[in-house]
Amino acid sequence: MLNPGVLLPVSICLPFVAALVIVLLGRAGGHGSGWLVLAAALGSVAALVPAASPGEIHVFEAPWLPAAGVQLSFHADGFGLLLAFIVAGVGALVALYSLGYMSGEDAAKVRRFYAALAAFMGAMLGIALADDLILLFVFWEITSVASFLLIGHRFENDDAKAGALTALQVTALGGLAMSVGFLLMGQVTGTFSISRIGGSPELVAGLLHSPLGTAALVLVLLGAFTKSAQVPFHFWLARAMVAPTPVSAYLHAATMVKAGVFLLGRMHPIFGAAPLWAPILVVVGTVSMVLGAYQAFRETDLKAILARTTASTLGLITLLYGLGATSEDSLQILNHTLYKGALFLVAGIVEHHAQTRKLAELGGLRRALPITFLACVIASLSMAGIPPLFGFVAKDSFYAEVLGAAYLVDRPLLQGAVLLASLATSAFLVAVAGKLTLGVFLGPVHQRQHDEHRSSGLALWPSPVLLAAGALALGLASLGHFTSDLVTATASGRGAEVHVYLLPPLGTPFYTSLLALVLGVLVYLRRDAVGALQERLAMLPSAADLWERLMTTTVRLAETYSRRWQNGSLRWYLSATVLTLPVLCAYALYAGGLSGRNVIVNLADMPWYGLLFCILLAIATMAAVQARTRLAAAIATTAIGFLVSMLFVVYRSPDILLTQVLIETVSTIFVLLVLVFLPPFRRHDMPAISRLVNVGISAAFGLTITLLLLLSMTPGLREPDNISVRPGGLLSLALAEGGGRNAVNVIIVDIRAMDTNGEITVLVAVGLCIYGLLRSRRTPSEPGQVQRPDGGGGPA
Amino acid sequence: MTRQSPIVRVIARFAVPLSVLVAVRIFLQGHDEPGGGFIAGVLLAAAGAMYMIAFGTRHAARVSWWRIGVVGLLLSVGTGTVPFVRGEAYMDNTILHLGSYHLPTATFFDLGVMLIVLGTLMTIFVELSMERR
């Protein structure tokens, strides 16, 4: 039988393949690309099913960069599978929804949208299942880039561009910090495997006792907080609401922002005992939670409200991780995904129907959108935490945790603050749920009626209805033991049996939850008064403005730096380069205890014609310096090159000779090609002092290089072992591993193929850049000339 | 570039094919003797430049050279991916034994290098020669 572990990379690859196919299909894909994304998502779900056997963790492992200790390892534990199923399942629903939602848009843009969506899905699956830190980071970055493309989907709109850029800046900054944190973790523990570090008490203890471990913790938390829009990075999420609604539902409710808290869950077994873990997470989580709910109540835009509540709930999950409540994190994650995904999709339907998302302009939609209304009611009730919905179960369990967590019980003052914040959050969420459902669907009809219906494309309601039904079903299933079992199996903290109840035992948690509900209804009834109070408190500086100012300052600093150092004067660049090299080399030589005294020069095997070439070389060099025209200088330089290659003849090194001659030929052609475009040649008159400085720089450069060359040829200083034919030497290695006698070439194409790989990529990139630059410069000035797709738009 | 004198054209007519042949030889011997993909690519580009000097850029500009570079990159990366898919490390080349003849898989990697060097250099040559003052 096929090992289910092998299917893990398959499920991750399917969406990527779909993205590639969409890109390659080009125009042939069009709106149908959405079906491809849907198929890929369903395929991923199917591939994950065999791995979901309780009590057993299926694993896929393959070497990736064995030299760096990086592995392609995927672990299908319950927690990872939970996120993976959410990603693929909600992904399928969102793709289905998009088929209707995006049907009115330009086919080329829709194609790009689906390609980015599919790539994002694959990357999220990777985050869910990756066990290797480096692998996790790679997928993490892909989601940042894909979300940039998706948020900026309507890039002709300035808001969309700004929103996408802010999201990318914040999440990429966090990702960068996180990558350093991961490297530190690997440095201290010697492995990048999450399960191996977390499973070994010695490694964890070593990490926590090392100062590098603390740094790693802070850096990793930065990554998690930026991704999950936690204070003080919460502002990007509200700005990202310029994205098309399926994107908001998928990235900013169900999946990507979950990656941050998911990372917290993954890191809890490792860092959970660190002294900084609980205080940071409790404070950040609590503040994010209450601030998000507070701001959600203030917002007037449907999607902005939902974004703020998302940040709030993510704060709640962060707080739970701070308290060490890892045995029911899956409950909160699943709950939020179901109701918030549904609400976002409902907001998209409302926007499509009413052409507005402003709360004040909406009302009375229940008759026009009855099914959507039903989905919205169920989802809102779940958000408000009202039985028999899943949200109630989650809220009850949360209060039980806040009231019972050992960390808080030991600190009554902090517990009071957290409890107050939780009550305020719940109250605001209840009020917001009321505003959403009652404000949009009940009351008098506000918005202009739209006769033209978007008839093309599929109906939008199935996806939100399914998600809302999930919230209802899981709530009802709490009557039995199904929900408890599900939460136990998918929690990040394994081993603890969890019980969740639809009919909870009467006790403080239940009464607190009830109190929050009453408070929420009160806030909703007095919403105008609360809103007026919020207006009066609004003079505090917002985090978004501070970030904006930080970015402007950064740009200004970069400009100042560039103007000073990158001033466009070739002479300045040359002096800087030519001066840096001898300084560095001189330091290295000094540190290594080498000087001119170590040089042993043996000119005995230098034939008379070698000497002749040297004299000619000196003459050519002087001619190059003294040349009065560019052409003369070019010819003299070429002569230098060919004379040097003659010296390779003298010393019988045919391969370098071959290279030198050909490179010399090609560079001569190149010089001749650009010669006509260069400005007239003129000699610079400069004051004697600059002249002296220049002579000094040149002399330092020449002397250092000469010394280096002489030292490299001095016997005793080379390491002969490295290149010998003896076992372990490069020559024997070349023959054994590469099957070639030309060691240099075998090193290039086989032994160090990774290096060459990087170099040729750069080479191709340079070629493409030159092509693009020269073409774009030329095309506007020749309006009559049509660019042919084969790239052959040359002058006829 | 304008059309050159008959002498240049006659020489180029012989020298260009000869250079291509030499490049092939240099490429094939690269594993054991001086040579290899990089040098062969440079030599081919030099032959291309000679062709352009003798017969003008019109024919050379018809080829989309950058695509050749990209194909080369795909070939090189693809060669490295094959062992990876088979469960070994990325870029872990092996030697194929075809009867008594041995063919290192690195040869395909090297072929990619040759195409990249050729494509990039020719892109630069063609684009620069099509610039106007």
Image (cartoon, rainbow, N blue to C red):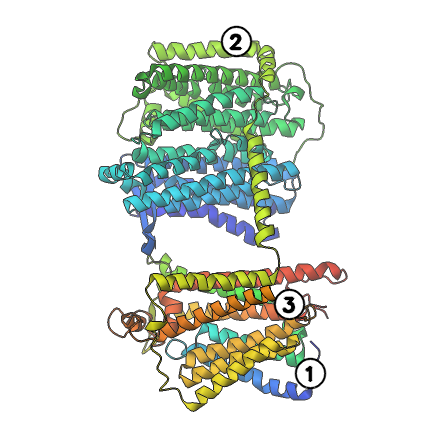
Earlier-in-chain disc, 3 versus 1? 1
Q: Nearer the viewer, mark 2 or mark 3?
A: 3
Left or right of A215: which side holds A351? right
Q: Could one spot residue A32 in this view of the protein?
A: no
Instruction: Pick whichever, A538 or A439, lies toward us.
Output: A538
Q: Do the residues under discs 3 and 1 have CB atoms within 8 angstroms?
A: no
Discs 2 and 3 lie in a common subunit: no
Q: Secondary structure at mark 1?
A: loop
Which residue is labeled 1 in the image?
B4
Instruction: Answer few, some or many: residues within 10 Å of disc 1's Cα (few below 14, many 20 plus, some between 14 and 19).
Output: few
Instruction: Please state the total of marks drawn on the protein image.
Output: 3
Crowding at mark 3 (Cα within 10 Å: few <14, some 14-19, many 20+): many
The chain that hosts pointer 3 is B
Q: Position of residue B21 (x, y in %)?
A: 50, 82
Q: CA distance from mark 3 to mark 1?
A: 19 Å
Q: Nearer the viewer, residue A466 or B76?
A: B76
Residue, far right:
A784
| Label placed on residue A522 | 2
Question: In whole angstroms, how far apart are the C-alphas of marks 2 and 1?
Answer: 92 Å
Give the position of the C terminus of chain A as an image quadrant: bottom right
**Type of amino acid at the residue the image marks with label 1:** Gln
Residue A81 drawn at (x, y percent): 37, 37
Helix, strand or loop for disc 3 = helix
Q: Amino acid at mark 2?
A: Leu
- The one of A508 and A182 positioned closer to us in this rendering: A182
Q: How many other residues sit within 10 Å of disc 2, few (<14), some (14-19) or many (≥20)?
A: some
Q: Mark 3 = which residue?
A: B127
The residue shown at (57%, 82%) is B16
Dot 2: what SS? helix
Q: In this view, which residue lies farthest toward the bottom?
A: A608
